[in-house]
Structures are given as structure tokens and as C-alpha cells.
């Protein structure tokens, strides 16, 4: 292939003033005007300091094939305009035509190179804006970073940020526009703002504009005030939030704050949602107001806005960025000594004591356990209470008594602890396949034991269904030795429970206890309960597959995206059994091609929903709460052994 070096740009400067050293056979003025390298007629983009790369031939040696010889200008005192090359050709017309053609070709190459470099510039950075998720206004001085803190920067006054990605080649020269690190997800932080739990992780794609929304925090602030309008010192205020846990709405502790000397408290960084406030009881130990050996006083729990029962307390509905003033009035009341003897307490066992007003469970009151005297004791104001005691450990027990305090010291009836229930689980297998009828091993205390049947594939847990139920959950007793295959749920205190059944073989077709469908209704355990749970297993599963429309096409797989550490699903699919139908709640992420498939669905009728963001707030066990979704998604009937295909639309109203 012929080699050529054809300049086309013009540059007006003095040759001796060029900051670049002259190369042999090339003037400084010529160097300065050249935008890149030429090797065998191929443009190679270079760094800012560009230079002309000559052939291996010495500078003073002409090219016999082209008849082109580079010569310096004779007059070095005058400014130069245009290229500083003289072409000496045997045939002038032919050479001129060749110069014109090559010059035109180089102009096209230069333009293409410029466009390519601009595109590389765009693709070698990640840029975007951090905005307020409510007002969509930009957020200045927000910290944008990767989860591993390897990249971080603050947004400018308009909320903008831009990460310049390294461009490297095999010689560590910054000439390529391919980024080689695992930057795939960006997060943002700013005091007064929170992550939006309904927004999926923000994927960082080079060359595109991304937007990171942040929710403005909600605030609850207020004062705890005595009836005399004096501030209450040292009062602790608790906040509870309404959250969905395993398909049920429950009140969950969300923090506490101690009132200052002015009785003021403040809860910050609250997400939009539903909340309740309660004060913890506090004895009045002010020496100026307390007579030694005399009547003791205290401040009973008060539930905002001023009631004495958690169930009757007002709910606080907060929106993003809302600030709510919540003042809580307290009343100083007399407290009286109470005690309850425990008939059969274990001296070496711990004990948890809960106190509920009129049997309505809730936070606030407390009593303690005196192990030496084997009794529950403490102070309570006037009222009727339910006192419950539970022990810890392998052989846990439970007991409860009612206590009435009527303006004087009180002693309740003796409390007898009853061992918690152990309930057998009987499994009926209606499998059509003979696979999985072998044996397996179970690790018990560092040694392996042989087990058979449902012990191999079925896991069962019981979780409290009450807001303030007894602490702790129950699970299957582990095998004690070889061939210990019976399934038993141990240590179930009296109360209501939801069963969690997970099988690696087939599906749970039915689960009942005393005729009650415990797949859809709570399991009720009374003291001494022994009625077994009946479980039916089948393997004629239904299959559900489909697509989700309305999603953007996923980005093409490149070296950078392949090396990314994490890429969340584009969308999530939720299968919620209807209240009067068998079936179990299922959720799964969408594959990159926009499809989903589940081959082990329990037959039944489901409402199938699709969401771009992973949802944690589906109260699928609460039929009343699920009425809000009646007009959303698709209702699909899945038959045993059959495959059903659906096409879903993203439901924007549940984002």
C-alpha cells in the first residue's frame, strides 16, 4: 500500500515560536496544524498533543512512487499561511489530481474522526441530575456516589453531576472510550432527603442522562405537657409505623425520642406513611414533690392525641416533606405497688412480662420479675390489666392473669406457667412422580443423620399475626437422630400465627387445623393445643409465563455492562391469590428480555400485577385492604398441570 502524508489545514504562526520541538523533515508550523497521526493512510486519534508520524523512510528521501518530497520553506522569516509542503511531481497534472483526491479524503476522515471523538466524549462520562421527587426541583450540593464509595461528587447549584470515566488502552494511554470499572449503580445523599422506597436502583449508563429522585423527609415535632402546662422532663416518646409484613398490616416500632428540658421532642427522616405516638410511663422521682414512704406518683402512658389505649389512638398520615406538630398532654397520677406470685417458675430461666390495659395489647406499661422471690412486681395506676409472662429457652412456658388496681396496693392471683404447645404436622403426599422418594442427610450437632420423606423438602414456620403478640416464632423441631422423620412445630405460645410453608418439591395443595384453612386464616393456638396440622402435597403444578409491555428496551450488552456487579430486574410480577381461591402468593423479577416464567405455581385464581419497582406493601393476606387493587392487573385462573400465558401492563398507580 502506498504511504502518504497530506496536510490540509492552514495555521498562521511563526515557525520558531511553536512550543513543540521540530521533527526531522517537518517544520514546527507544519506540526502545529496537524490534528492527528497518519500511518499508511489510516487516521489514528491521538491525545491533545498531536504530531505527524512519518514513514520509516528518512525525511530527505523522496518517494519514487508518488514523486512527493517534503522540503522546508526557504524563507523562515515570514509568517506561514497554509500547509508548508512542496510537492515535486514528474507529471504535474497527475500529481495535482492525486493531491486533490487525497486532500478531499483526508477532510472526510478528519470530519469523521471529530464526530467519533465527540461521541467517545459523550460515552466516556456518566451525567445526570438529582431532583426533589415531589416538586421535581433540582437539589444542589447532594452527594452522588457508588455503593462502594469508589466514586463520589457533589452536585452543582443546578443539581447536575458528571463522572468522567477513565479511557485506557493496553499501554495505559488515555485514548479509548471504554470504561473498565464496575460502576453500574448510583445513589444520592442529602440531609433532609431520603431514598424513595418505590424507585428502583438507578443504573448508570455511559452517554445517557439519568435522574436520581430523593424524597423530602417528613417531620413530627411536639411537646409533652403536664396538665398544669409545665413541661414534662425526661419523658420518652415512641413512634410506631404501619407496615406490611408477610402480607399483613402491622404496627412496628420506628424509634423513640427523649423530650428535652422544655418537653420538646422531634422525629426526623420519616417516609410518607401512617404513624402513632405514645409516651412511656415515668415515675415522678422529684425529691421536692415526693415524701419518703408516702404515696408515689407517676405519668401513665398517653397515646396521641390524648387517650389511654393504643387501639383508640389517632393515626397520623404523613406526606413527603410534611411537618406535623403533635403535642401530648400528660396527667400525674398515683401509682400503687402490685405483685403476682409465679407458682412454678424456673429459677434459672429468664422471663418476659407484658402488661396490657383491659386486655388490649399495646406498648406503654411495664412490670418486672423478681427471680429470688419468684414473683412479678412493680407499680401501676388505677385500672384493669392483663399481665402475661413467658420464659425463654428450649422448654419455654407461658402464663397470664388479670389484675385489678383500685386505689390501693394490689396482689393478683397466682400465675401458673404452662409449657408452650408442640403441634404435629401430618403430611399426605399425592405425588404422581416417584422422584424424590429417597433419603437425605441432616446436620445435627456437627454429625450427619439420615432423614426421609417430607423432612427432606418441607420447611414450616409460624409467625405471630398480632401487632403486639408474644415475642419469638416457632419452627420445626430438628431431627434428634437417624430416621427421626416426624414433623413437629415446637414452642408455640398461645396466640394467633401465620404459617409459612416452603417446599422444594411440588406445592402445598392444602393445610388445615381442626377444619380451618390455615393457608388463608391465622392458626389459633390455645394453652395446651395439640390438634395436628394436616398438609396435602401435590406435584401437578401449574405454569405461568408471559411478557410485560411498556418497558424500554434493555441496553445492549457491552464489556462494561457485562462487568457490572449488579443489575436489578426491569420489572416485578406479583401473583396474589383471590380471597376465596386456593393458591399462594408469588413474586419474581422479569428477565432482561421482558419475559417471566414460573413452573411451580399452585393451581388457583390469582390477580397478577406488574410493577417497575419492587413492592413491599402488598397486604395480600388482608382481603379488605386488597380491595384497592380490584381494578388493577389481570385475574388469571391456573389449572393443575396446565400452562397459562399472559401479557401484562405496568401498573403506574402502585409505583
Image (cartoon, helix red, strand yellow):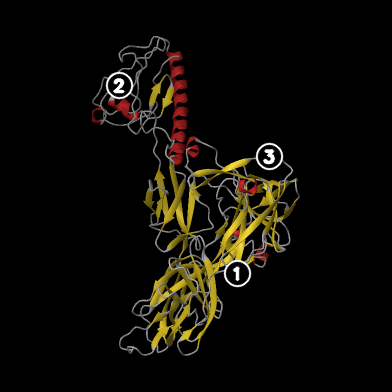
Q: In this view, does 527 lie above or below 117?
A: below
Q: Distance between the residues labelled 2 and 3?
A: 81 Å
In the image: residue 40, left or right of residue 84: right
**Quick one: 597 or 47, which is closer to the camera?**
597
Among the 4 quarters of the image, the one containing residue 334: bottom left
- Crowdedness of circle 3 by 10 Å Cα count: few (<14), some, many (20+)? few
- Crowdedness of circle 2 by 10 Å Cα count: few (<14), some, many (20+)? some
In the image: residue 641, left or right of residue 597: right
* Residue 444, horizontal then vertical, whole percent: 51, 47
Mark linked to residue 527: 1
What residue appears at the point 46 percent right and 25 percent down from the top-left corner? 104
Q: Is residue 115 above or below residue 418?
A: above
Residue 633 at least partly seen: no
- Crowdedness of circle 1 by 10 Å Cα count: few (<14), some, many (20+)? some
Classify mark 2: helix, strand or loop.
loop
* Residue 125, horizontal then vertical, whole percent: 43, 42
Frontmost of labels 3 and 1 is 1
- On-image quarter of the C terminus: bottom right
Classify mark 1: helix, strand or loop.
loop
The residue under label 3 is 435
| Dot 2 or dot 3, earlier in sequence | 2
The residue under label 2 is 26
In the image: residue 514, left or right of residue 394: right
Residue 141 at least partly seen: yes
Say if mark 2 contacts mark 3, CB within 8 Å: no
| Dot 1 or dot 2, earlier in sequence | 2
- On-image quarter of the N terminus: top left
Among the 4 quarters of the image, the one containing residue 376: bottom left
* Residue 553, horizontal then vertical, whole percent: 59, 43
Amino acid at each position: 500500500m502506498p504511504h502518504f502524508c497530506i496536510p490540509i489545514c492552514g495555521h498562521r504562526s511563526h515557525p520558531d515560536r511553536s512550543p513543540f520541538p521540530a521533527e526531522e523533515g517537518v517544520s514546527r508550523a507544519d506540526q502545529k496544524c496537524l490534528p492527528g497521526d497518519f500511518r499508511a493512510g489510516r487516521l489514528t486519534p491521538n491525545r491533545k498533543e498531536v504530531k505527524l508520524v512519518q514513514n520509516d523512510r528518512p525525511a530527505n528521501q523522496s518517494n519514487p512512487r508518488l514523486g512527493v518530497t517534503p522540503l522546508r520553506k526557504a524563507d523562515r522569516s515570514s509568517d506561514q499561511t497554509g500547509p508548508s509542503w512542496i510537492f515535486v511531481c514528474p507529471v504535474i497534472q497527475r500529481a495535482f489530481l492525486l493531491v486533490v483526491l487525497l486532500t478531499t479524503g483526508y477532510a472526510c476522515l478528519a470530519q469523521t474522526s471529530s464526530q467519533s471523538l465527540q461521541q467517545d466524549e459523550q460515552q466516556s462520562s456518566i451525567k445526570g441530575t438529582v431532583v426533589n421527587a415531589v416538586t421535581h426541583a433540582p437539589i444542589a450540593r447532594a452527594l452522588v456516589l457508588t455503593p462502594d464509595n469508589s466514586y463520589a461528587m457533589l452536585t452543582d447549584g443546578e443539581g447536575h453531576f458528571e463522572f468522567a470515566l477513565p479511557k485506557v488502552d493496553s499501554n495505559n494511554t488515555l485514548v479509548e472510550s471504554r470504561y473498565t470499572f464496575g460502576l453500574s449503580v448510583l445513589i444520592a445523599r442529602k440531609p433532609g432527603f431520603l431514598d424513595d422506597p418505590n424507585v428502583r436502583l438507578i443504573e448508570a449508563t455511559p452517554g445517557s442522562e439519568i435522574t436520581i429522585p430523593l424524597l423530602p423527609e417528613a417531620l413530627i415535632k411536639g411537646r409533652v405537657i403536664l396538665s398544669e402546662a409545665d413541661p414534662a422532663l425526661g419523658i420518652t416518646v415512641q413512634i410506631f409505623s404501619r407496615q406490611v409484613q408477610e402480607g399483613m398490616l402491622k404496627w412496628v416500632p420506628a424509634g423513640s425520642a427523649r423530650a428535652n428540658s422544655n418537653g420538646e421532642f422531634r422525629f426526623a427522616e420519616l417516609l410518607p406513611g401512617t404513624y402513632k405516638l405514645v409516651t412511656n410511663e415515668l415515675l415522678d422521682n422529684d425529691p421536692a414533690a415526693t415524701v419518703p414512704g408516702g404515696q408515689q406518683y407517676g405519668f401513665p402512658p398517653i397515646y396521641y392525641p390524648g387517650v389511654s389505649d393504643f387501639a383508640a389512638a389517632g393515626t397520623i398520615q404523613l406526606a413527603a416533606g410534611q411537618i406535623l406538630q403533635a403535642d401530648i398532654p400528660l396527667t400525674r397520677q398515683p401509682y400503687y405497688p402490685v405483685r403476682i406470685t409465679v407458682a412454678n417458675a424456673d429459677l434459672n430461666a429468664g422471663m418476659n412480662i407484658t402488661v396490657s390495659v383491659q386486655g388490649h395489647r399495646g406498648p406503654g406499661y411495664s412490670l418486672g420479675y423478681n427471680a429470688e422471690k419468684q414473683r412479678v412486681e412493680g407499680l401501676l395506676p388505677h385500672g384493669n390489666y392483663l399481665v402475661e409472662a413467658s420464659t425463654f429457652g428450649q422448654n419455654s412456658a407461658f402464663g397470664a392473669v388479670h389484675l385489678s388496681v383500685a386505689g390501693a396496693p394490689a396482689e393478683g392471683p397466682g400465675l401458673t406457667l404452662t409449657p408452650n404447645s408442640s403441634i404435629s404436622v401430618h403430611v399426605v403426599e399425592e405425588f404422581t412422580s416417584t422422584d424424590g422418594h429417597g433419603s437425605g442427610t441432616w446436620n445435627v450437632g456437627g454429625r450427619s443423620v439420615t432423614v426421609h420423606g417430607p423432612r427432606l423438602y418441607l420447611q414450616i414456620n409460624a409467625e405471630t399475626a398480632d401487632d403486639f403478640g408474644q415475642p419469638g416464632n416457632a419452627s420445626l423441631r430438628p431431627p434428634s437422630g437417624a430416621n427421626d422423620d416426624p414433623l413437629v412445630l415446637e414452642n408455640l405460645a398461645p396466640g394467633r400465627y401465620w404459617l409459612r410453608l416452603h417446599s422444594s418439591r411440588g406445592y402445598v395443595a392444602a393445610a388445615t387445623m381442626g377444619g380451618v384453612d390455615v393457608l388463608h386464616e391465622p392458626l389459633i393456638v390455645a394453652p395446651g393445643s395439640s390438634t395436628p396440622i394436616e398438609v396435602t402435597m401435590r406435584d401437578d403444578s401449574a405454569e405461568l409465563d408471559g411478557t410485560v409491555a411498556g418497558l424500554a428496551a434493555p441496553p445492549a450488552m457491552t464489556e462494561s455492562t457485562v462487568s457490572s456487579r449488579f443489575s436489578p430486574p426491569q420489572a416485578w410480577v406479583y401473583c396474589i391469590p383471590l380471597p376465596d381461591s386456593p393458591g399462594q402468593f408469588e413474586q419474581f423479577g422479569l428477565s432482561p428480555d421482558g419475559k417471566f416464567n414460573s413452573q411451580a405455581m399452585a393451581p388457583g385464581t390469582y390477580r397478577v400485577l406488574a410493577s417497575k419497582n419492587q413492592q413491599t406493601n402488598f397486604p395480600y393476606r388482608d382481603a379488605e385492604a386488597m380491595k384497592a387493587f380490584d381494578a388493577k392487573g389481570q385475574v388469571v385462573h391456573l389449572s393443575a398441570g396446565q400452562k397459562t400465558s399472559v401479557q401484562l401492563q405496568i401498573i403506574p398507580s402502585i409505583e
